[in-house]
Amino acid sequence: MLSVPPQPGPDIRPVRHWKTASAAEAAGLISSGTTVGVGWLGDGLADALAASFAARQEPRDLTIVYAATQGEGRTHGLNRLAQEGLVRRVVGGQWHPVPALQALAVSNRIEAYSLPVGVINRLFRDIAEGLPGHLSRSGLGTFTDPRNGGGRLNRRTREQLVRLVRPAGDEALLFRGFPIDVALIGVAFMEGTAAIAMTRDAMTIARAVRRCGGIVIAQTDRIGTLEKLPPGQAVAPDTLVDVLVVAEPRERRWETFSSAAAPRPA
């Protein structure tokens, strides 16, 4: 009788093509003048960046690009980077959850753009595909239209990121693409497997940075894995991540994709 060898069980440990780093070590990988695409930023890494800038004036002059802040709270995440010199330019979709960055923009201390959330997400996608920009009719006739300011929020912001074009005779807006050097995203592990999970938007940011030859820094929770994929999330190849930062339990919230519910921060 032919015997069938037993099938191996699932690999319960991550493959770990990335390296694990502390928040301070990860902050040291971000150079001055780089463009950072943000899907999620935990407080630990945000504080490490702010502390590095305070101690060494490095990194400085960062360009921050994000679509939605996903409920980080008014004193968390990107708000902790609101220091003149640390940030030079912000290209954002949702500005209302980041009052600290708003204050820098209102006082003309940083360059600031407000673009539609959907446009920024699609711009990440088109950068990942190697396209020069994103063509859309979204924003025509609004504040985003270059005839009405091109999304620029203050006098300091002079460069045009949006052009009015007329392909096939119809008006459209061309949102210019640009290299993205660093991705900051949140990930989780699938329970009982070696797979990591992230939102599709986070995966797009990571792919855009990969296309540009940059570094992908993922932040995960020390506790909690996913039993199944929630809506809007996907299993990602572990080779998409370069550095894994383990967040402290106090940082646990919706963006870390823990299976346990966590309260929203104030």
Image: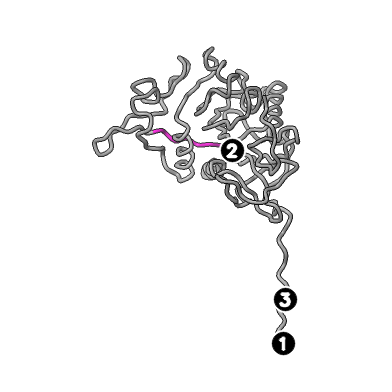
The amino acid beneath tag 3 is Pro
Q: Earlier in the sequence, mark 2 or mark 3?
A: 3
- State which quarter of the image contains the C terminus: top right
Residue at point 48%, 37% (across, down): 121
Question: Residue 148: where, in percent of width, then height?
Answer: 36, 20
Contact between marks 3 and 1 (CB within 8 A): the answer is no
Residue 179 position, x and y percent, is 50, 36
**Which of the two residues, 113 or 257, is positioned nearer the viewer here?**
257
In the rendered image, residue 228, in percent from the top left (x then y), is placed at: 64, 51
Relative to 60, does residue 103 appear above or below in the rendering? Answer: above
Q: Residue at x 58, y 32 (%)?
A: 70
Q: CA distance from mark 1 to mark 2?
A: 55 Å
**Which residue carries the number 1 mark?**
1
> In the rendered image of this protein, does residue 191 appear above or below residue 258?
below
Where's residue 69, x and y in %?
57, 30
Indicate which disc residue 5 carries: 3
Horizontal side, residue 47 vs residue 207: left or right: right
The crowding category of the residue bearing disc 3, from other C-alpha atoms within 10 Å (few below 14, some 14 to 19, many at least 20), is few
Q: CA distance from mark 3 to mark 1?
A: 13 Å
- Element on which disc 2 rests: strand
Q: Is residue 184 above or below residue 11?
A: above
Position of the N terminus by quadrant: bottom right
Q: Amino acid at mark 2?
A: Ala
Q: Amino acid at mark 1?
A: Met
Residue interval drawn in magenta: 175-184
Which of these two is toward me, 153 or 193? 193
The numbered mark, 1 or 2, whose residue comes first in the sequence reads 1
Does 251 appear in magenta? no
* Foreground tag (3 vs 1): 1
Q: Secondary structure at mark 1?
A: loop
Q: Which residue is mark 2?
A: 183
